[in-house]
Amino acid sequence: MLKCENVHPQLSAYVDREMPLWTIRLIQWHLKRCSSCAYEAMRIRQTDKILHQLDSVKTSDNFLPDLMRRAAAITVIEREQISAIRRILRRLESSFAWLRYSFRTRMRPYAVVASLALIASVVSLTLYQPRLPLPANDALTLAQTPSEKQALLVEFEIVPINQFSKPHLSSNRRTSPFIPTDQGKEK
Amino acid sequence: MRTSDEELMMKCRNGDMSAFELLVMRYKDLITNFIYRSISDYHRAEDLAQETFLRVFRSAARYEPKCRFKNWLYLIATNLCRNEIRDRKRRNTAYLDDLIPENEDASYLELMQDVSQLPDEVYEKKERQIIIQQTIDRLPENQRLALLLVSYQNLRYDEIAEVLECSVSAVKSLIHRARQNMKTLLIEVGIGESSHAKV
Ligand SMILES: [Zn+2]
């Protein structure tokens, strides 16, 4: 005996006859005895009837000639190009099929070693980065708060240029005539 | 004897334009109707129907007769409809967004202006049709497409599954939910009897 909660979700497929004949018979048997499910099936049919009240449209008269003209403009060359690409793809596919076959039968250990080597070299190349010198304005960019930044900038304004001697600049790359350093502060 | 679509398509693959023309003749109204019901815009529907057939023509070389032509054709049309629906959503036009009722009213008024000169009976019929179409528009994309394919295009569930690229059980559930939603929405707009009038 079918239960209503099982019949309910099947009713749409029942109306569309999208189920085996024996299920249709079972549902028919249930509908004869259950007014609630019978009503639901009627509502589905009614909704479909409402949908069919929409008039269908026809394509305009110039649809076909227009389309045929556009199709004719798709040149033979384009079609040939597509088939050429297909030929290449097929050839590629067959070579890959050979590779797959070789891998499965003979070349598995070699292939594993080769792919590991390839992965290792790719990883090391990606991770390797040449060391760059630290930027000269480090102190300013490292300053956390606006007030710190402001303090640095204010200091810059009051440092007299003649306090920076040439050997100083060459001995310490971080010293810049524009940004004061700890050494600068000591002076 | 009627040449099958698949045979015509194989001829078309070899560059036979008359075979292509025959295929277009067979399906142009069906496809245009399907697209029109999906996007509610006749002129755009014609454009997309043309695009569907041009895509068929362009990819004729790739066609394999193991796939049913009709399903393949609807698959192309459905994908074009989906793109159109998504583009419109992105452009935030009135059509599908029931969150913007004032725009819906604007498009409704625009449509009604075209039919307001008609005799009462025809006017009422047209008005009803516009409301039904607007109700279809309010269904979620996949439910709408599934419902249109089963109700207007008479596709079987397994064919719809191929077109919508999902399982048959998913189609079954989509159509069930589409009909449930449609029923509720129609009652909301005053078409179809309310559930209180139970027999
Ligand atoms: Zn029941």
Image (cartoon, rainbow, N blue to C red):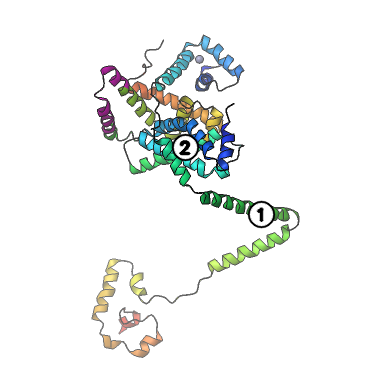
Secondary structure at badge 1 equals helix
Q: Which residue is mark 1?
A: A96
- Residue A100 in the image: state x and y as whole percent: 69, 53
- Residue B163 in the image: state x and y as whole percent: 52, 35
Chain of the residue under label 2: B
| Residue A53 highlighted magenta (yes or no) | no
Observer-nearest of A159 and B161: B161
SS majority, magenta: helix
The answer to whether residue A64 is seen in the rendering is yes
Mark 1 and 2 residues: CB-CB less than 8 Å, in contact? no
| Residue B124 highlighted magenta (yes or no) | yes
Q: CA distance from mark 1 to mark 2?
A: 34 Å
Horizontal side of B127 relative to A85 (left or right) equals left
Residue under the image location 34 percent in, 79 percent down: A181
- Give residue B179's mark: none
Against A90, is B119 above or below?
Answer: above
Observer-nearest of B188 and A178: B188
Disc 2 residue type (three-letter): Ala
The stretch in magenta equals B106-125
Disc 1 residue type (three-letter): Phe
The quadrant in which residue B123 appears is top left
